C-alpha cells in the first residue's frame, strides 16, 4: 500500500522516521509529501494537483502530520487530497476544528465535555472583569495556535496579564485566557485515541517548577492506569472533533478530569517509551483498515 505522510519535516523527525521504518516493516511504501511542493489546480476538468512539477504520485492513504501551526495553504492541500478521494487520517474538517485551541474548546464544550473556563481576548480592555470570571489571577495566557508549550504563560496578576498580552510574540488579533487549575500545576495526562479506541496513555510531570508539563520543555512521562471516566472523555473528545487519531491532553481538577486541548498530529516519542506500545504501527494499522473498508 502507498502511504503518504503530509509533513514539512524531513525523515529524521521522530514521527516521520517511525512511520517510515514501521511502514516498510509492514510491507508498505511510505512517502513524505511536502505540502509546499504541491501545486493546486481547480477548473472545469475537476481538481488536480502536481508534486515537484510532476504528476501527483499514487497514494492509497495520507496522514496529515503538520501540527497546530498548519497554514491556510497547507489546509488547502489537505482539502485537495480529500476532493481527489484519497482517504485521510485525519480529514479537513476535523483538522480545522482542532488546530485552533479555542475552536477546539468550543466544539468540546458543545458536546458537554468538561473544559477549563476560557476566554478569547482581542485587546486589554475589561481585563479585571475577565480575569475574575476565570477565578483568577493567576490565569494562563496562550497563543491560539501555539504548540509544544510555546506561547503559554502563567500570569500571576492583572498587570502581568496585560504585560504578557502586549508582548506575547504572535499575539496578532486574539489570544486565549484560561483559568489556572492550581491542583494540576505541572501535571497532565496524554491519552492517544486511534479509531475510537484508547491505544496508550501517560502522565506528564514538569520539572524545575514549570507549570507546563510538555515533554519538549523537559517534562517527564510516566505510567498511569486510566479510569473509565478518563477513557470515556478521551474517546468522546476525539469523536466530537471527528478525529481518527487524537492526542487528548487532560487535567485533574477538584471536579474531575478536564480536557485542556486535543492534538490531531500528536508526537509520540515519549509515549511509545512509557506505554511500551508501537504507536506508529497502531496508526498505520488503522490507516490500512480504513482503506480496505473495514471501518466506516
Image: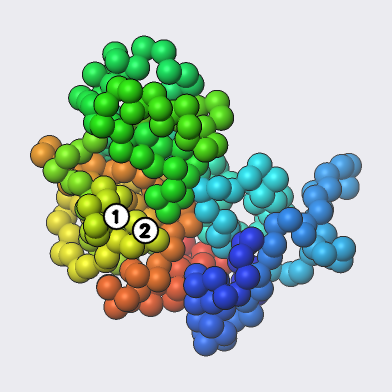
Above or below, comparing residue 202 to residue 243 in the picture:
below
Question: Is 145 displayed left or right of 200 in the figure?
Answer: right
Task: Give the label on residue 217, or none.
Answer: 2
Q: Residues within 10 Å of mark 2 (few under 14, many from 20)?
A: some
Residue 112, percent from left and from top: 28, 33
The residue lying at 47 percent from left, 19 percent from top is 123
Which image quadrant: the N terminus?
bottom right
Q: Which residue is mark 1?
A: 213
Q: Does residue 240 appear in this view?
A: no
Question: Is 285 displayed left or right of 132 in the figure?
Answer: right
Residue 230, percent from left and from top: 20, 52
The residue lying at 24 percent from left, 35 percent from top is 180
**What is the spatial separation of the Cα atoms under label 1 and label 2, in whole angstroms?**
7 Å
Q: How many marks?
A: 2
Above or below, comparing residue 285 to residue 211 in the picture:
below
Residue 178, percent from left and from top: 32, 32
Residue 243, percent from left and from top: 45, 51
Q: Residues within 10 Å of mark 1 (few under 14, many from 20)?
A: many
Question: Is 22 displayed left or right of 183 in the figure?
Answer: right
Which mark's residue is nearer the viewer, 1 or 2?
2
The residue lying at 45 percent from left, 68 percent from top is 283
Residue placed farthest to the left in the image?
A: 254
| Residues tagged 1 and 2 counted as in contact (Cβ below 8 A) | yes
Choose between 224 and 133: the one closer to the eye. Answer: 133
- Secondary structure at numbered mark 2: helix
The residue lying at 33 percent from left, 28 percent from top is 160
Choose between 47 and 96: the one closer to the eye. Answer: 96
Amino acid at each position: 500500500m502507498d502511504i503518504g505522510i503530509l509533513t514539512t519535516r524531513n525523515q529524521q523527525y521522530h514521527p516521520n522516521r517511525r512511520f517510515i521504518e514501521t511502514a516498510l516493516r509492514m510491507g508498505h511504501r511510505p512517502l513524505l509529501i511536502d505540502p509546499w511542493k504541491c501545486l493546486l489546480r481547480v477548473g472545469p476538468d475537476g481538481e488536480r494537483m502536481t508534486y515537484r512539477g510532476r504528476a501527483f504520485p499514487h497514494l492509497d492513504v495520507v496522514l496529515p502530520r503538520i501540527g497546530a501551526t498548519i497554514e491556510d495553504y497547507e489546509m488547502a492541500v489537505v482539502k485537495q487530497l480529500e476532493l481527489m478521494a484519497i482517504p485521510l487520517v485525519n480529514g479537513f474538517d476535523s483538522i480545522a476544528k482542532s488546530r485552533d485551541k479555542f475552536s477546539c474548546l468550543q466544539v468540546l464544550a458543545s458536546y458537554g465535555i468538561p473544559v477549563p473556563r476560557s476566554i478569547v481576548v482581542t485587546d486589554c480592555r475589561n481585563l479585571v472583569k475577565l480575569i475574575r470570571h476565570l477565578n483568577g489571577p493567576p490565569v494562563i495566557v496562550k497563543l491560539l495556535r501555539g504548540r509544544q508549550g510555546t506561547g503559554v504563560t502563567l500570569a500571576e496578576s492583572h498587570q502581568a496579564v496585560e504585560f504578557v498580552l502586549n508582548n506575547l510574540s504572535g499575539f496578532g488579533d486574539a489570544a486565549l485566557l484560561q483559568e489556572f487549575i492550581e491542583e494540576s500545576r505541572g501535571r497532565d495526562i496524554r491519552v492517544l485515541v486511534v479509531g475510537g479506541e484508547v491505544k496508550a496513555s501517560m502522565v506528564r510531570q514538569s520539572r524545575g517548577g514549570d507549570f507546563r508539563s510538555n515533554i519538549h520543555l523537559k517534562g517527564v512521562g510516566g505510567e498511569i492506569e486510566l479510569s473509565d471516566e478518563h477513557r470515556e472523555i478521551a474517546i468522546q473528545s476525539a469523536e466530537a472533533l471527528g478525529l481518527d487519531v487524537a492526542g487528548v491532553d487532560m487535567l485533574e481538577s477538584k471536579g474531575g478530569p478536564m480536557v485542556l486541548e486535543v492534538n490531531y498530529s500528536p508526537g509520540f516519542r515519549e509515549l511509545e517509551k512509557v506505554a511500551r506500545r508501537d504507536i506508529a504501527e497502531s496508526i498505520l494499522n488503522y490507516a490500512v483498515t480504513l482503506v480496505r473498508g473495514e471501518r466506516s
